[in-house]
Amino acid sequence: MRFIYYSRWLTGRIRHEANNLQLGMWLAFVAGAINAGGFLIVNAYTSHMTGLLSSAADNLALGNLALVLKALLAVLVFFLGAACCSLIVSFMRRRQLDSRYALPVLVESVLLLLFAVLGTFSGLHFSLLYLLCFVMGLQNALITKVSGSVVRTTHVTGMITDLGIEIGKLVYWNRSGGSSDVKVYANRAKLGTLASLVSVFFLGGILGALGFKTFGSLTAAPIALALGALSIVPLFDDLSSKD
């Protein structure tokens, strides 16, 4: 019973800072696990669009057109994953459905389960890169929309930049006697949020890398099942309300 309430609270329609942060932490863990562990399968970090675009530029200069197309296609698929999430949420919001945010999580769950199965076939590893890029785009767009761009799960560069800014404010020495409106204060709540997300992403990366190294793509299966469980209750709520 508690799990039902938790699933409804975590991925349901009503959003606030607490459940946005917890959903962000779940997805950051998944992103870390899939990004680091998936590298062992597809030989690329599937959420790192900066690196992929840089790779495309480098290979274009070197004349490696096949690698240019591979990198650009990966970026395009990430973009399509984000666009797909936006379409799902907008479609379901217009119909006032409680599962508007749960359905993208369930879609991610299904795709990760597909990856777990297809990854056991070595000949498909090249194409699985695009499947994971789509998943990463989908989930990053979801938490961005849900939190109003406050929480991200794959954009660790931005999170560490913001973390550095807040740390700089925290250690800044405000001279006594100065005007209070020019004093520098760190946003401690934001600092805690950023530190938590980066830490969970890193933890997911460690466990994901160990899991993929030991069990291969099947490591994605329990991750997929966990996401499915966390998203299923709001979907059942919508289905039962139609009866």
Image (cartoon, rainbow, N blue to C red):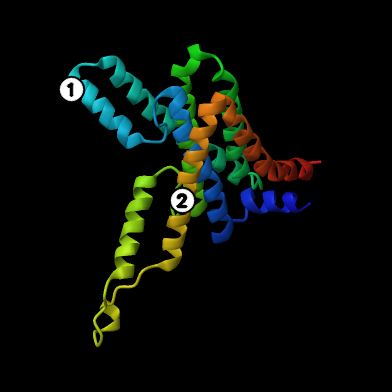
Q: Which residue occupies the foreground of this view, 105 or 237?
A: 105
Residue 2, horizontal then vertical, whole percent: 75, 53
Is label 1 in contact with label 2 (beta carbons under 8 Å)? no
Residue 86, horizontal then vertical, whole percent: 50, 40
The answer, for residue 16, to whether it is visible in the render is no
Q: Quadrant of the C terminus?
A: top right
x 32%, y 19%: residue: 69
Give the amino acid type for the residue marked by disc 2 in the picture: Ser
Location of mark 1 (residue): 61
The answer, for residue 177, to whether it is visible in the render is yes
Give the amino acid type for the residue marked by disc 1 in the picture: Ala
Location of mark 2 (residue): 199
x 43%, y 50%: residue: 198
List the single residue furthest toward the left: 61
x 29%, y 64%: residue: 168
User: How far apart are the alpha carbons under marks 1 and 2?
Assistant: 36 Å
Q: Which residue occupies the foreground of this view, 204 or 126?
A: 204
List the single residue furthest toward the right: 243
Instruction: Find numbered disc 2 in the image and state the secondary structure of the residue it sits on.
Output: helix
x 62%, y 55%: residue: 14
Q: Which residue occupies the foreground of this view, 161 or 106?
A: 161
The image shows residue 144, relative to residue 207, as above or below, that is below
